Amino acid sequence: MTSTRQFKSRDGYIYVYNPIQAYPQSYIKRATITLEQKIGRRLQPHEVPHHINHVRDDDTPENLEALSKSEHSRLHMKEMLAKRYLKQEPVSTRETQKYL
Ligand SMILES: [Zn+2]
C-alpha cells in the first residue's frame, strides 16, 4: 500500500489525506478520487460517488458511479423503503410520495 494517511469515517467511507493539491479539503473521500479517475473528469458539485454494491469502503472503479445528489438520495430512499416493505415495517404515504 501507499504511505498516504487515510481513515474510515464513522459512516463507513474511506478518506485519504489531501493527495491532490486541487482539492481544498485536507481529507477527501477515496471514492471521489477513484471515480474521477475512472470517468476522466472532476465530479460536479451536485454529484456524489455511489457504491453500486453498497459496500462503502469498496472503492474499486467498477463499484463506483456518479449520480446527482437528488438521484442518489432517491435511489437510497427507494431501497430503504423496499427493505422496510419486505420486513413489513410501516411506511407512511408521505414518505412514499416524497421519493417514488
Ligand atoms: Zn450511494
Image: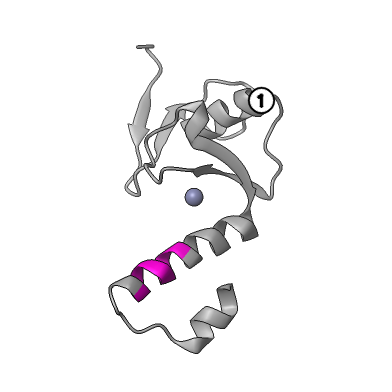
Give me the residue at 40% from left, 82% from top.
Answer: 91
- Tell me the magenta residue range: 79-85
Percent from the top left, x then y, of residue 44?
A: 71, 42
Q: Which residue in the protein does label 1 denote? A: 22
Asked if residue 28 can be seen in this view, the reply is no
Residue 88 in magenta stretch: no
Percent from the top left, x then y, of residue 92?
A: 44, 87
Q: How many labels does the image show?
A: 1
Indicate whether 6 appears above or below 66.
above
Locate the N terminus by quadrant. top left
Prevailing secondary structure of the magenta residues: helix
Mark 1 closeness class: few <14, some 14–19, many ≥20 residues within 10 Å: few
3 or 40, which lies in front?
Answer: 40
Q: How is the image coloured?
A: one colour
Q: Which structural element holds mark 1? A: loop
Q: Looking at the picture, which amino acid does disc 1 mark? A: Ala
Does residue 66 appear to the left or right of 31 in the view shown? Answer: right
Locate the C terminus by quadrant. bottom right
Give the residue at the far top of this rendering: 2
